């Protein structure tokens, strides 16, 4: 995959987001369809122009043949379809990759990537879902759910590098500042570092304000060939680099934190090499933030600071608008809403288009978007820019 983005230039041409938060009375497929409609309208096309569809897994609606079920529901007959990608929070960025590879292969030239869920108001039994989706005998019978795994990662990072709860809290505070500027963000009330470290403990050292939201909603983006993109309404945003890596599935099988981050760094090197740019060329980072420790470790893994230096890097407004590296300018999973990484991609597109309003980073030319699945188990990343 090292050069296919050079052979055939790929763009994101439309984005859509539904109402977010607690939205009772709507199914996962309704959120899918609403988000798809908004993305199609944003691109200035009709659903008949869509000839590929990629969907993601739902926590609530375990539909067999999910992609074709959605396509029928939405009145589409795609020539390329990829069913229900499920790599946790790594999913959204790899939906874009699947769409790009389909376009490179000549299977489609305009691919809708869409996800929706009613996780906040739907009937979701997370324990049963985990049993259904994974071999759980190694950890889950002992009560180690997702916050516990990230708590262990945070404890180890603190032990090895001296990272503090206050530094992690700064990530949540910065995300909330950005969310206050995002019209559809769920959480906009300002918070302080003291608010975070004094909020309820979920799994030491993770407090409730160190943890992501649970929300209903839908998100979509459309990936197209450059030729197709030039016929559409908005400025194309080019897909310039892609990479992924995985070191483990279960936290008990993970290498040490330093090794995890070294592997992350190798993957990010591949992404930057594919894009043909350097880290200093990144204007905005939309980083998957299921927990504050995820953001901090991802910043280190991406190479924006040294391994173990993330704590000091996030201090003093460095990751806020106007700082060295604005991170999650929409509020992220911590404050805007949670739908995997769909909204991270959409915000990156807005930044490159120059349409992010009060959140706009001046003259943004390149963004990096990450996804993280499992217990820091899988990483995906993509670089978007204003030119190929």
Image: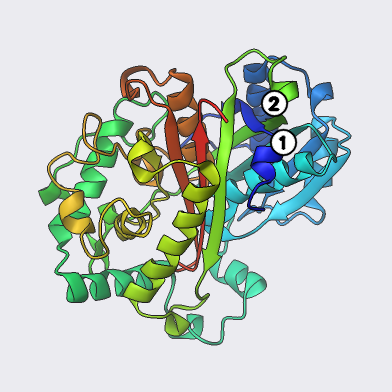
Q: Secondary structure at mark 1?
A: loop
Confirm whether residue 28 shows in the render.
no
191 with respect to 124 (left or right): left
For label 2, the residue is: 226
Residue 76 placed where, x, y %? 85, 32
Q: Quadrant of the C terminus?
A: top right
Which is more toward the observer, 220 or 295? 295
Rounded to the nearest angstrom, the CA distance separating label 2 from label 1 is: 8 Å
Q: Secondary structure at mark 2?
A: helix
Residue 347 placed where, x, y %? 46, 31
Q: What residue sits 35% from the left and 68% below the top?
A: 150
Graded by Cα atoms within 10 Å as few (under 14), some (14 to 19) or many (20 or more), the crowding at tag 2 reads many
Q: Is residue 196 above or below residue 11?
A: below
Q: Quadrant of residue 294?
A: bottom left
Rendered image: mark on residue 78: none
For label 1, the residue is: 8
24 with respect to 264 (left or right): right
């Amino acid at each position: 995959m090292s050069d296919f983005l050079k052979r055939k230039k790929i763009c994101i041409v439309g984005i859509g987001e539904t109402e977010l938060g607690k939205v009772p009375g709507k199914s996962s497929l309704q959120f899918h369809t609403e988000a798809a409609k908004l993305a199609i309208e944003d691109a200035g096309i009709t659903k008949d122009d869509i000839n590929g569809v990629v969907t993601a897994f739902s926590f609530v609606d375990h539909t067999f043949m999910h992609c074709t079920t959605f396509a029928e529901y939405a009145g589409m007959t795609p020539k390329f379809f990829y069913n229900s990608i499920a790599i946790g929070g790594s999913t959204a960025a790899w939906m874009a990759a699947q769409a790009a590879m389909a376009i490179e292969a000549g299977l489609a030239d305009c691919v809708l990537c869409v996800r929706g869920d009613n996780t906040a108001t739907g009937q979701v039994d997370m324990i049963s879902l985990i049993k259904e989706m994974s071999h759980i005998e190694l950890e889950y019978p002992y009560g180690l759910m997702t916050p516990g795994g990230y708590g262990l990662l945070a404890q180890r990072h603190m032990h090895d590098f001296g990272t503090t709860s206050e530094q992690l809290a700064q990530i949540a505070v910065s995300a909330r500042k950005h969310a206050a500027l995002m019209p559809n963000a769920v959480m906009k009330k300002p918070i302080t570092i003291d608010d975070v470290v004094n909020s309820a403990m979920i799994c030491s050292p993770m407090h409730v304000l160190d943890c992501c939201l649970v929300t209903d909603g839908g998100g979509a983006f459309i990936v197209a060939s450059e030729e197709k993109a030039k016929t559409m309404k908005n400025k194309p945003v080019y897909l310039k680099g892609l990479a992924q890596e995985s070191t483990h599935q279960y936290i008990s099988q993970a290498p040490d934190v330093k090794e995890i981050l070294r592997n992350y760094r190798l993957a990010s090197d591949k992404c930057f090499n594919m894009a043909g740019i350097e880290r200093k060329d990144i204007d905005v980072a939309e980083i998957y933030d299921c927990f504050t420790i995820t953001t901090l470790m991802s910043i280190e893994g991406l190479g924006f600071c040294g391994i173990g230096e993330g704590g000091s890097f996030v201090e003093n407004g460095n990751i806020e608008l106007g700082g060295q590296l604005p991170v999650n300018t929409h509020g992220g999973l911590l404050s805007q809403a949670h739908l995997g990484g769909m909204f991270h991609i959409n915000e990156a597109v807005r930044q490159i288009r120059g349409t992010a309003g009060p959140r706009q980073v001046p003259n943004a030319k390149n963004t990096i978007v990450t996804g993280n699945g499992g217990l820091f188990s899988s990483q995906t990343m993509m670089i978007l820019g204003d030119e190929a």
